[in-house]
Amino acid sequence: AAGVIQSPRHLIKEKRETATLKCYPIPRHDTVYWYQQGPGQDPQFLISFYEKMQSDKGSIPDRFSAQQFSDYHSELNMSSLELGDSALYFCASSADSGGQETQYFGPGTRLLVL
Amino acid sequence: ELKVEQNPLFLSMQEGKNYTIYCNYSTTSDRLYWYRQDPGKSLESLFVLLSNGAVKQEGRLMASLDTKARLSTLHITAAVHDLSATYFCAVPGGTDKLIFGTGTRLQVFP
């Protein structure tokens, strides 16, 4: 079965640089979620989109922005990167919004900020 | 603010033994999710518990939900090495967000 696709899988950036992470949801899933997981930590919700509109927001820094496109893929844009942004970034998708459906997670993008 | 706590945080158990992981959450919720994560890997959905008294079983894992006690359990029966991973419970904490527990790192040894 098709899964959530994330790219790139690994990314190394310098402080103050920008990064763009991409997420392609499972076909026919219209809701996308972004989570950040630091080393040894539990995943922290960043933001979600339903039908291309932001539907929920968590602890996402102002330096980060995200959007969902007409084909339902999503991009997380991160600017002025800091060392503390080094983490695993997961995208998840579900068939509906509102917490009613299981969120299926992608393989993650491992971001290292030097 | 919703808090989700798991215990134990670390669990080292011998193959063939049984054990239970506990997940407590601080506000009302009628659903709870269990995920498994291997080191550096994605989160794999294990169970979705949708109502009070729900029980689900898959192989050597069985999960239950008591919404009145705000408690879920993940019971491991006759552990095998392949079950070694970190297990997270998660509770809906808003429109879409999941609030994850602290995670239980399980290691099964021969």
Image (cartoon, coloured by chain):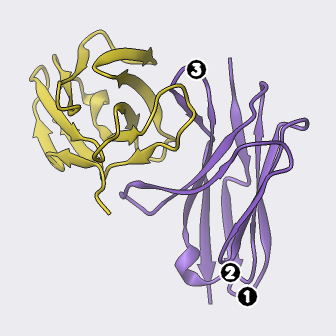
Chain colours: A yellow, B purple
Whether pointer 2 and pointer 1 mark residues with C-beta atoms closer than 8 Å, the reply is yes
Taking A71 as reference, is A17 above or below it? above
Of the two numbered discs 2 and 1 on the same chain, state the one appearing first in sequence.
1
In this figure, which residue is indicated by the disc labeled 2?
B79
In this figure, which residue is indicated by the disc labeled 1?
B16
Q: Nearer the viewer, mark 2 or mark 3?
A: 3
CA gap between label 2 and label 3 equals 35 Å
CA gap between label 1 and label 3 equals 39 Å
Please rate how many residues cluster around mark 2, counting C-alpha atoms within 10 Å: few if below 14, some from 14 to 19, many from 20. Answer: many
Image quadrant in which you'd find residue A77: top left
Amino acid type of the residue that numbered disc 2 sits on in the rendered structure:
Ala
Q: Nearer the viewer, residue B90 or B29?
A: B29
Image quadrant in which you'd find residue A57: top left
Q: Position of residue B10 (x, y in %)?
A: 65, 59
Of the two numbered discs 1 and 3 on the same chain, state the one appearing first in sequence.
1
Of the two numbered discs 2 and 3 on the same chain, state the one appearing first in sequence.
2
Q: Residue at x 62, y 78 (%)?
A: B108
Q: Nearer the viewer, residue A10 or A45?
A: A45
Q: Position of residue B69 (x, y in %)?
A: 90, 38
B3 relative to A100 in the view: left or right: right
Image quadrant in which you'd find residue A74: top left
Amino acid type of the residue that numbered disc 1 sits on in the rendered structure:
Gly
